[in-house]
Image (spheres, coloured by chain):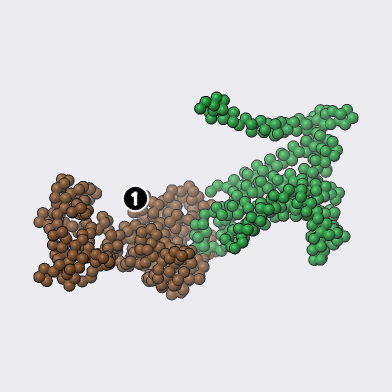
Amino acid sequence: MATVEYHKVGKSFGPVEVLHNLSLDIERGSFVVLLGASGCGKTTLLRMTAGLETISAGEIKIDGKVVNNVHPRDRDIAMVFQNYALYPTMKVRDNIGFSLEVAKKSKAEINQRVEEAAKVLNLSELLDRKPSELSGGQRQRVAMGRAMVRDAKVFLFDEPLSNLDAKLRAHMRVEIRQLHDRLKATTVYVTHDQIEAMTMADKIVLMKDGNIVQEGSPDDLYDRPNCRYVAEFIGTPQINFLSGEIISDGGQAQFRADGTDLPLVEGYAAHAGRKVTCGVRPNDVRVDPDGHIKGRLQIAEKTGADIQFHLDIDGSEFVAVAPRATFAPVGEEIAFSMSAEKMHIFDEASGERIEV
Amino acid sequence: MKLGVLSADRPLVWMLPLIAMLVAFTIIPLFYNIWLSFHEYAPFKRRLEFVGWENWRLLFSDVRMWEALWTTMFYFGVVLTVELVLGMAIALLLDAEEFGFGVLRTVLTMTLVVPPAIVGMMFLLIEDPEFGVLTFVLDSLGILDKSTPILATGSTALWGVMLADIWQWTPFMVLIFLAGLRSLPPEPYEAAMLDGASPVMTFRRITLPLMSKVIAVAVLIRGIDVFRMFDYVFVMTSGGPGTSTYTLSLYSWQQTFSFIKWGYGATLSLFTLVIILVIANLFIWLAKVRW
């Protein structure tokens, strides 16, 4: 277990700068998810932590010690690769036990630890197979096993679940989190899947174009996104946006869009006259015959647990989640409402959250 | 378009030229050779006479044949081992993008375009007892005396020949190994680094097993070549001094063309073929690596 600190870290590939002046602290034993769209630099940052990429600027510290020039071999890091990177010529048993063999552990100890890991990962039957004889999910578990038998300071995961089918992915999410809770190892996990991030992380670091956009707990990012990008990235179905402006109606702030006024929480009155975007999550919208906002129903998607109404409000799409029993014919006008606390107000030009 | 007999569903027609060549230059000579091994040329009667198993009986009781076989095996073992180890070492060194390495890799191919007989001549000069550069160097280092010329001394002549072979064919191994090394996936190496493996450990547990098929192919190709080696000994020592550098090929050449023993020469070459087939198949069986 160790802390990991990034101090003004930068990375360039030739003239292309992929990480800019990035600083981040990872606490001992925490599970941090680096989240972002592909190309945002999250995998590069992870590989720099492992020592597989050089550090162009700044420094990375593991347990307070600068590791910029420490060879990967000496960093004491376990990593699960996206394509698993198993040793193709070794049996599963040797794949998992290789790090122990390198560390010159006794045969008995290697066997014991490999078999323990195999039991947890449900690999006991497969120990004498070669990686080429395994399915994707099994290979992924071998890659996990290889990390598990290590007492590494830091565990790194590079999109380990992206090659699995949805069911297995959901199962492995739980497994990885449980594993972390048991080992209490400092973990950095890279993914582009916000559901993985939301379900597993102690802390999410959302990245974009080589910068950190927001870091915080999953709830922080969901409830208080600091900009439109975060609001859009986190949460399914995706958040709705309405354009409008803040007006002050006798000291009471209102959000005015296309002639409809929606009351805002206190404090926004000071921002009256500002052009803003209002974000509302589909789950925070209530179908309400007395509601202020009306939209024409385009399509109703049943997801099983509930029903998603895709509405057309003056040409822009708006999604509302309703209980499954709700029924409305396509083409009907539906009224709905939302509470002021659930409305996220962003500056129209900059996309930044307007705090009150 | 109507092609008649040349249509694509008549593959045999298309393969006919190749089959004809194979039959004319490989199959017929092979069977003729087998037939020949049961006959012998009678010089005074000027014709081939049937001798039954006589040639084969002679072969197994021929001391010079066993000597030549041993020489060939020894040459085979040393040359192949050195070329394999040296080839791999150089390939590992060159498997990097350092300045000038591209040129080096190109230069390596140059030994391969020189005819082996010419290489033999070159080394004849290099190892010349009077003005050969190798003789001079070994003499100045006190390793060899000028009074014991490399190629004219029984204990060193074969080594002198091996040198030519190793010089010419190690680059071939390097090229094959380099191609193999460059096609290896990078991920296991990254994983091995993080697992803490040293370069030696990584080579032994990852590179070598991954390269096993490439190594097997290279050794097989070179092995067959080395076993029927003729050019270097023919040019450099003609089998001497004495019979110390007679290989099987050279010996069967001598029996056939110097002593005009067509039948026995054919038997010797068939025997060489059988040994090569046995070694090759043994090797293929041993090296059958499964991922």
Q: Secondary structure at mark 1?
A: helix
> Which is more toward the observer, A69 or B80?
A69
User: Going by the image, does A216 lie left or right of A251?
Assistant: right
Amino acid type, callout 1: Lys
Vertical comparison of A246 with A327: above or below: below
Which residue ends up furthest to the right in the rendered image?
B44
> Which is more toward the observer, A131 or B119?
B119
Q: Which residue is pictured at 50% across the width and 50% down the height?
A: A130
Indicate the position of residue B11 as horizontal and vertical percent values.
57, 30
> How many callouts does the rendering have?
1
Indicate the position of residue B64 as horizontal and vertical percent values.
83, 43
Which subunit holds the residue at mark 1? A
Which residue ends up furthest to the top in the rendered image?
B4
Chain A's colour is: brown
Vertical comparison of A65 with A101: above or below: below
Chain B's colour is: green
Q: Which residue is mark 1?
A: A167
User: Going by the image, does A236 lie left or right of B204?
Assistant: left
Indicate the position of residue B137 as horizontal and vertical percent values.
79, 63
Vertical comparison of B250 with A344: above or below: above
Q: Quadrant of the C terminus of chain A?
A: bottom left
Indicate the position of residue A5 as horizontal and vertical percent values.
41, 72
- Whether residue A246 can be seen here: yes
Q: Quadrant of residue A32?
A: bottom left
Which residue ends up furthest to the front in the rendered image?
B1
Q: Residues within 10 Å of mark 1 (few under 14, many from 20)?
A: few
